[in-house]
Image: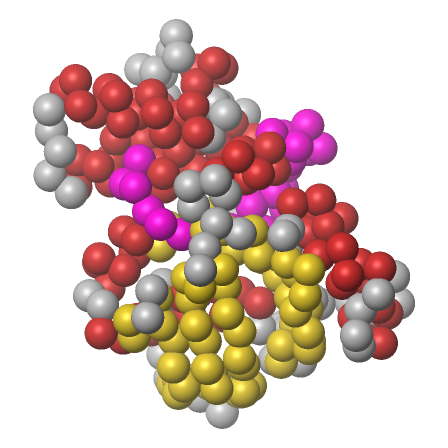
Amino acid sequence: MVKFQIQDLNIWFGSTHALKNLNLEIESNEILSIIGPANSGKTTFLRMLNRLNELEINFKMDGKVELDKKDIKAIDTQILRKKIGMVFALPLPLPLSIFDNVAYGTKLHGIINKKKLQEIVEAALKEAFLWEEVKDRLNISAFKLSGGQQQRLCIARTLAVEPEVILFDEPCSGLDPISTAKVEEAMLKLKQNYTLVLVTNNVKQAARVGDRTAFFLSSELIEVDKTEKIFTAPSDQRTDDYIRGKFG
């Protein structure tokens, strides 16, 4: 089942043509890995899916982007960003307790019943593979967690508002291998209930977790295919060169 349908997408920031003539479908309950060198359009594409690019000056877009067959421009941004959560490269916990970090968005959406909040927080922390590490200290500051734990806390905070899609923008770029493995383990479990789009500069990570992989270069989508095929027999020589580390 198709979650996103993107047709003839072009994005500009002023005179910079940031994405060119992009056509892509994203399936429900898949992990789509997006790879490519710096300034290839990966993050612009990711931020387009929940309309974060609109916060930039001189942003312009044409083409069609549909979520569940509905034009995202017709969806209120607050509703859209509840449906499509985002986890950024650097963990951004709030200056609150672990519990209140996870409950923050849920409270904003009007849920204040203490028992209900406790259920939501526990479920989100379990989905983010963090519950067992923090269940006895939910009232301590989130800043006392390690970097990897903070990133999984941010994933839990995103999950607590019950999104349908989770966007990951280099979520492991500052993490050690053990923390990275835990985040990846969470991703692989999460795809049972969510659609995940992962931008990563780590091609090995893309190969480990992606069901499909898309390669971006110079603001264009060069190819997208099943991850195994992209990493063993890509259709475009430029994809092969990038994966082998010949540039990027």
Q: How is the image coloured?
A: secondary structure
Residue 111 is at least partly visible in this image: yes
Question: Horizontal placement of 102 versus 248: left or right?
Answer: left
Quadrant in the rendering for residue 67? bottom left
Which of the pair 164/137 is nearer the observer?
Answer: 164
Whether 149 is drawn above or below 248: the answer is: above
Residue 147 is at least partly visible in this image: no
Whether 222 is drawn above or below 200: the answer is: below
Whether 32 is drawn above or below 21: the answer is: above
Asked whether 50 falls inside the magenta stretch, the response is no
Q: Which residue occupies 36% across, 29% down? A: 124
Which of the pair 94/247 is nearer the observer?
Answer: 247
Q: Residue furthest bottom?
A: 15
Question: Horizontal placement of 31 versus 92: left or right?
Answer: right
Quadrant in the rendering for residue 224? bottom right
Q: Residue furthest front?
A: 1
Q: Which residue occupies 64% across, 51% down? A: 210
Question: Horizontal placement of 149 versus 71: left or right?
Answer: right
Q: Position of residue 4 (x, y in %)?
A: 42, 66
